[in-house]
Amino acid sequence: MEVMNKILSESDAKNKRLEFPARSLSAFPMPDGQNSVEFVAFDMNERQWSLKVSIRNEGKYAKPWLKGEWDDYVHQKGLKKGDKVILTVQEEENGERIYRIRAERKHFGFWYSIDNQQ
């Protein structure tokens, strides 16, 4: 199931966090009383990335952020404004969730995987 499909903003690519769509929070069961959850996402090359979804404690809206090794992921993939990040989750029969992350870049009107270029 696709959790997030987002074209990166300047701040997503330059800061150490990605503004995360609130509608995607349901893919991350957050324990009561906590405002963050850590998970591992595999890229197309099966590399593991330790990521963390956090929501702010104050304010009217949840305003979630993706942190953890996000900054490392951005640098390793060479991501920039206008690139796309897609996060998916697959729930196994035993209830385990397997997250996958991939990055794409638009070239001549078509999206191409950045992972395949490395």
Image (spheres, grey):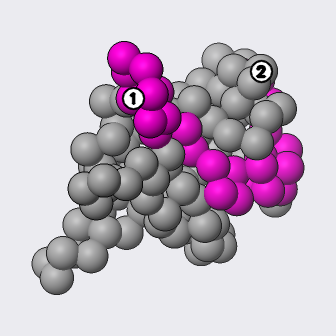
Mark 1 belongs to which amino acid? Answer: Ala
Is residue 104 visible from the viewing direction of this image?
no
Give the amino acid at mark 2.
Answer: Glu
Residue 94 picture location, percent across and down: 16, 82
Residue drawn at 63 percent across, 49 percent down: 67
Give the magenta part as a residue range: 55-83
In magenta segment, residue 89: no
Give the residue furthest to the bottom: 94
Q: Quadrant of residue 52?
A: bottom right
Going 79% across and 34% down the picture, which residue do you hit? Answer: 15
Q: Is residue 27 left or right of residue 64?
A: left
Spot occupied by residue 49 in the image (x, y as percentages of width and height):
63, 66
Q: Position of residue 40 (x, y in %)?
A: 51, 68
Residue under pointer 2: 10
Count neighbours of disc 2 (C-alpha within 10 A) and say few if under 14, some if 14 to 19, many if 20 or more. Answer: few
Quadrant containing the C terminus in the rendered view: bottom right
Residue occupying the point 14% across, 78% down: 93
- In the depicted view, which residue is nearer to us: 19 or 110? 19
Query: Which residue position holds label 1?
Result: 62
The answer to whether residue 21 is left or right of residue 41 is left
Q: Secondary structure at mark 2?
A: helix
Residue 21's disc is none
Q: Residue 50 appears in which quarter of the rendering?
A: bottom right
